[in-house]
């Protein structure tokens, strides 16, 4: 009864995700892995998809053990459709997965850096750069802002790893301004029921202005102006 009440409360999702994160070692066997594992241990399967978006078509290799196997995630799609880009910009795709956001952005901006903690995602994203003929983007392995220490961007764009826990989301938002030029943008998508209110509040505390770019299909896309 109590568990049901907690789960249905406003902060229920974060409470549950926090508890799971805390007691992860008790619940997960060493053989389990997630899309945000550093080394996914599920057998590698791949599936190539074709995506046409923002007037351009792309081929993406997707893989088991990497976020959104076999499809373009709906949240990612909304973010890609609505993200603000400029031809002179240098952009960071943080948590790139197989690379959809960074690769689409690379057609519209000057330079893209794509990062992820999942080594399989890194290897697949590098292949996707090649098969899409992308020359102005690079892929780097590492956690959060470690791979771009000391670097600045005009925009950081992310579909953040909500299941990795609240602390990871917080780190992404509060440290973004350190990696943005003046008036640079943090653009992110979040499920309305999985922390949108929390993320928007954090963005309002850390950015001069926050705008909702899109609301739909259970997602919100926010842009924070540094
Ligand atoms: C929701 S997925 C989005 C993937 C991809 N951008 C997309 O939209 O298809 C979040 C990504 O963040 C990565 N990730 C999780 N924790 C991370 C961390 N600490 N540092 C960098 N990337 C991380 C995951 O491996 C995953 O690829």
Image (tube, rainbow, N blue to C red):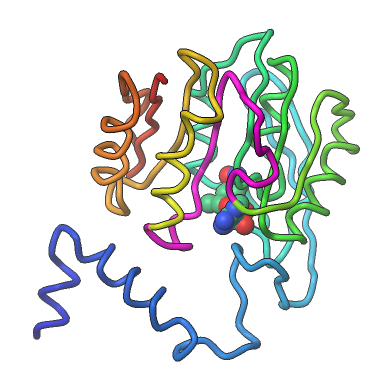
Residue ID at (59%, 70%) = 34
Depth check: give the residue in front, 179 or 85: 179
Query: Magenta residues, as a range?
Result: 144-166
Which residue of the protein is positioned furthest toward the front in this rendering?
A: 150
Residue 148, percent from left and from top? 68, 38
Left or right: 3 as drawn, with respect to 91: left
Q: Judge whether 114 appears above or below 109 on screen.
A: below
Residue 78 shows in the view: yes
Q: Quadrant of residue 47?
A: bottom right
Depth check: give the residue in front, 145 or 137: 145
Residue ID at (16%, 81%) = 3
Q: Which quadrant of the rendered structure holds the N terminus? A: bottom left
Residue 130, percent from left and from top? 90, 37
Depth check: give the residue in front, 133 or 177: 177
**Residue 185 falls inside the magenta stretch:** no
Residue ID at (74%, 39%) = 50
**Residue 155 falls inside the magenta stretch:** yes
Q: Quadrant of residue 201?
A: top left
| Count of labels in the image | 0
Residue ID at (68%, 66%) = 38
Left or right: 29 as drawn, with respect to 19: right
Q: Quadrant of residue 80?
A: top right
Residue 68 shows in the view: no
Residue 179, percent from left and from top? 56, 29
Residue 83, percent from left and from top? 51, 23
Q: Which quadrant of the rendered structure holds the C terminus? A: top left
């Amino acid at each position: 009864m109590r568990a049901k009440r907690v789960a249905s409360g406003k902060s229920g999702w974060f409470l549950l995700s926090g508890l799971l994160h805390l007691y992860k070692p008790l619940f997960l066997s060493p053989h389990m892995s997630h899309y945000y594992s550093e080394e996914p241990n599920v057998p590698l399967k791949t599936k190539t998809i074709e995506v046409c978006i923002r007037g351009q078509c792309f081929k993406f290799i997707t893989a088991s053990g990497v976020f959104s196997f076999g499809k373009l995630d709906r949240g990612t799609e909304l973010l890609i459709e609505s993200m603000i880009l400029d031809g002179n910009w240098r952009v960071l795709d943080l948590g790139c997965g197989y690379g959809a956001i960074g690769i689409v952005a690379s057609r519209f901006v000057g330079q893209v850096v794509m990062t992820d903690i999942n080594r399989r995602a890194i290897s697949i994203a590098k292949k996707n750069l090649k098969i899409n003929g992308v020359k102005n983007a690079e892929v780097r392995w590492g956690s959060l802002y470690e791979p771009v220490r000391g670097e600045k961007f005009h925009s950081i764009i992310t579909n953040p790893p909500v299941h990795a826990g609240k602390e990871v989301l917080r780190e992404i938002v509060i440290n973004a301004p350190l990696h943005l030029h003046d008036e640079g943008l943090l653009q992110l998508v979040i499920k309305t029921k999985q922390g949108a209110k929390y993320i928007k509040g954090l963005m309002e505390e850390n950015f001069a202005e926050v705008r909702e770019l899109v609301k739909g299909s259970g997602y919100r896309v926010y842009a924070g102006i540094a």
